[in-house]
Image (spheres, rainbow, N blue to C red):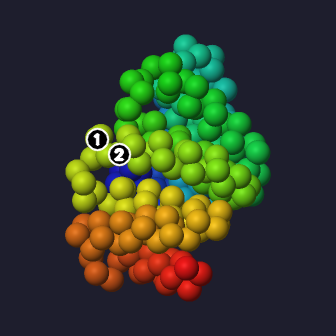
Amino acid sequence: IGLVYKNIGNYPEALSYYEKTLEIQQLLLPPDHPDLATSYNNIGNVHTKMGNYLKALLYLEKTLEIQQLLLPHNHPDLASCYISIGVAHSSTGDYPKAFSYYEKALEIQQQSLPLNHPDLTMCYGNIGNVHTKMRNYPKALSSYEKVLKIQQQSLPSNHPHLAISYNNIGIVRYRMGDYSKARTSIEHAIQIGQRSLPSNHPDLQQWRNNLERVKNKS
């Protein structure tokens, strides 16, 4: 039920349901039971969605503590938890700490997944976002290009995730002063978006605005 509320964006109701579940589990289960880790993780992720990043970190770190006790060090669930903690740190502006968690997640995924596995795109994308925030633009570009390469192998050519990647690459190239390539990338994003998104979609509008900014420079 909590997941249903979360999926429709009703985060307060989702949180209430997850907290009630946790209360019952805490009465019935030992403190390191995996079901508790799941509940802590659910609550932490909802707090992230609601913008309560410090509360999110509190619950996600409890998840991690249990997972580190119960799971092998390269288990995919640990990678997911590291990503969630990284997102919360990034949202508070602590980019170096976010980066360290994304790196841990990527290390696990690289050990357990094929080189072009779609799950890697989340890690590479988050690492690219942190590099962008920290103004490490060449490193951000490298991360976003890795995302795009995997997406080109695993997604249809008009999938909106490809458009997001082209836009990210365009923004980084714009910030590096490479306006011609920035324009080409953002135009790609818009072309894909026009085929795959409603005409009034906010992402599409944002990409059009980005293109105008680039045109004014080139």
Q: Amino acid at mark 2?
A: Gln
| Quadrant into which the C terminus falls | bottom right
Residue that appears at 23% across and 51% down: 156
Residue 206, how many percent across, how many down? 47, 77
**Of 191 and 126, which appears nearest the observer?**
191
Task: Classify mark 1: helix, strand or loop.
Answer: helix
Residue 189, how many percent across, how many down? 38, 66
Residue that appears at 71% across and 36% down: 100
Disc 2 to disc 1: CB gap under 8 Å? yes
Q: Is residue 149 above or below residue 69?
A: below
Residue 37 visible in the snapshot: no
Q: Amino acid at mark 1?
A: Ser
Residue that appears at 41% across and 48% down: 148
**Of 72 and 139, which appears nearest the observer?**
139
Residue that appears at 51% across and 82% down: 215
Relative to residue 163, is residue 181 drawn left or right? right
**Of 119 and 63, which appears nearest the observer?**
119
- Dot 2, crowdedness within 10 Å: few (<14), some or many (≥20)? many
The residue to which callout 2 is attached is 151
Task: Classify mark 2: helix, strand or loop.
Answer: helix
**Of 59 and 28, which appears nearest the observer?**
59
Q: Which mark is residue 154?
A: 1
Snapshot quadrant of residue 97: top right
Q: Is residue 194 above or below residue 113?
A: below
Residue 212, how many percent across, how many down? 49, 84
- Dot 1, crowdedness within 10 Å: few (<14), some or many (≥20)? few
Residue 176, how many percent across, how many down? 65, 63
Q: Which mark is residue 10?
A: none
